[in-house]
Amino acid sequence: MRQQTVNAATTNHEIRDNPWLRSEVEMKSAVLCTVLVAAVSLAAQQQPAQQQPPAPPKPTNPTNLGSDANGNPLRLATKTGHVSNYDESKVKPYMLPDPLVMSNGTPVRDANAWRKRRAEILRLYETDIYGRIPAKTPAVKWQVTLAESPAGEGGAIKKRVTGTIGDAADAPRVNLTLNTPANAKGPVPLILLVSFGGQSGVPQDPPVAADILARGWGYATVLYTEIQPDRNNTFNQGVIGVTLGGQGERAADEWGAIGAWAWGVSRILDYLETEKLVNAKQVAVFGHSRLGKTALWASALDERVAAVYASCSGEMGAALARRDWGETVDDMAQNFPYWFAGNFQKFAGRWNDMPVDAHMLIALSAPRPVFVTGGTADQWADPVGMFKAQVAAGPVYRLLGKKDLGVSELPPLDTPLTNGDLGWHYHTGGHSATPADWKAFLEFLGKYFK
Ligand code: GCU
């Protein structure tokens, strides 16, 4: 009888509130423990020493709390004590700043007024989030380092140019590899991939390279760390190092690594304006994860970017920062301080005080097309928060006579939305830009690049 009351359905809550149940459970576990200890010591006696499993490594990062039952990463932000949430019922209500109301309360009712609001939002992002690019940055000199190949694999012309940042003997060098269709009759639209580099450290071609070329477009790759290293304490290197010239430190409102990578995108656009193989008015920028954040910021800063594809860009990318899901401002400020302006630190634990949120970052690209993706197994990047930000950027697109996402409820998984000027794809899978994402993006981009 008593045995039956303590079954698998008994919740911790019931056990906590019912002393009788507790003693029953405790009794059972005490018995279980005794049996286990006996079994373990018996096993230990029987096993030769060398077959003992190695001691588990001591955790080296106290902020890493492992993962939840669904495999989602659990992280502790030490300054605020925040632990990653993956429960919709625990997402606290939040209010997004209205992208169509000026800071002084004036509503934004037309495209002219949006230009003013846009400048205001841009300034807020510069001051508090990504940091402004210093007034004086080094010039970049571009040289051809691999002459145009004859039509090679897949009918592509390959060409490499190298940009030297500043004029020091040990100046950082940025390699840009262009692939354009050999049968092109003139300058072609281009997708610029800001790349992590594959296992070999060399940027990989997109999985849809052949489709891109077949559409009569080109693609180019650049390794982001050639612009600025992706490590803490490296402001004496990369373009930030050259800019500081060994003199002091960056100001609290100045750029971090994401700002530096975005600066690199602009310098590549400078070069492409001189490149006869490419139509510099049709350059889309792709980035994944931290480079998805970079692509959005690059497009906000430089309106020559014709379209953005931000893959799994997550926190401080396309995901709403006020929404408590997966990575938060607190994690980001703690784990990647050097990606941001020093001022960003003040928002740990104060998300609602941020004058901006991801819908505004997206809207800084309006009326230009923005495509956003997420993955089911990448909850750290809050795919639903990215979808909500795309929806919340909609009013700006509509004001400018463009088409928003077309829906405000999450569509079924693996069903791309490509009809509007804002696009979306939620793939089944993890933290990556999948072939299906790419396929959807090309369809989306095809409305603009003919
Ligand atoms: C970390 C970080 C993310 C980032 C990702 C990446 O997971 O928390 O914000 O997007 O790295 O760049 O791969």
Image: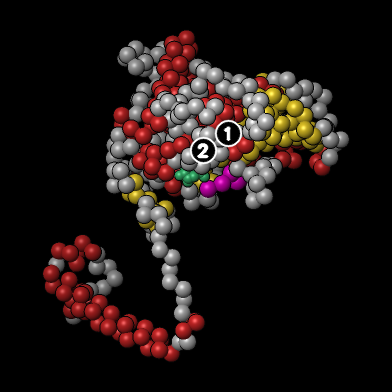
Q: Quadrant of the N terminus?
A: bottom left
Left or right: 4 in relation to 151: left
How far is disc 2 from disc 1 in space, using C-alphas?
8 Å
- Work out whether 286 lies above or below 82: above
State yes or no: discs 2 and 1 in contact (Cβ < 8 Å): yes
Residue at the image point whose x is 63% and y is 25% from the top = 166
Left or right: 341 in relation to 425: left
Location of residue 93 by image quarter: top left
Q: Tell me, yes or no, whether the highlighted magenta stretch contains residue 433.
A: yes
Q: Which mark is residue 234?
A: 2
Q: Residue furthest left?
A: 19
Note whether residue 244 is visible. yes
- How has the structure been colored for display? secondary structure
Disc 1 crowd rating (10 Å Cα; few below 14, some 14-19, many 20+) is: many
- Work out whether 411 lies above or below 108: below
Q: Which mark is residue 238?
A: 1
Disc 2 crowd rating (10 Å Cα; few below 14, some 14-19, many 20+) is: some
Q: Residue furthest right?
A: 150
The part of the chain drawn in magenta is 431-435
Q: Quadrant of the C terminus?
A: top right
Residue 288 vs residue 63, the one in the foreground: 63
Magenta span: predominant SS is loop
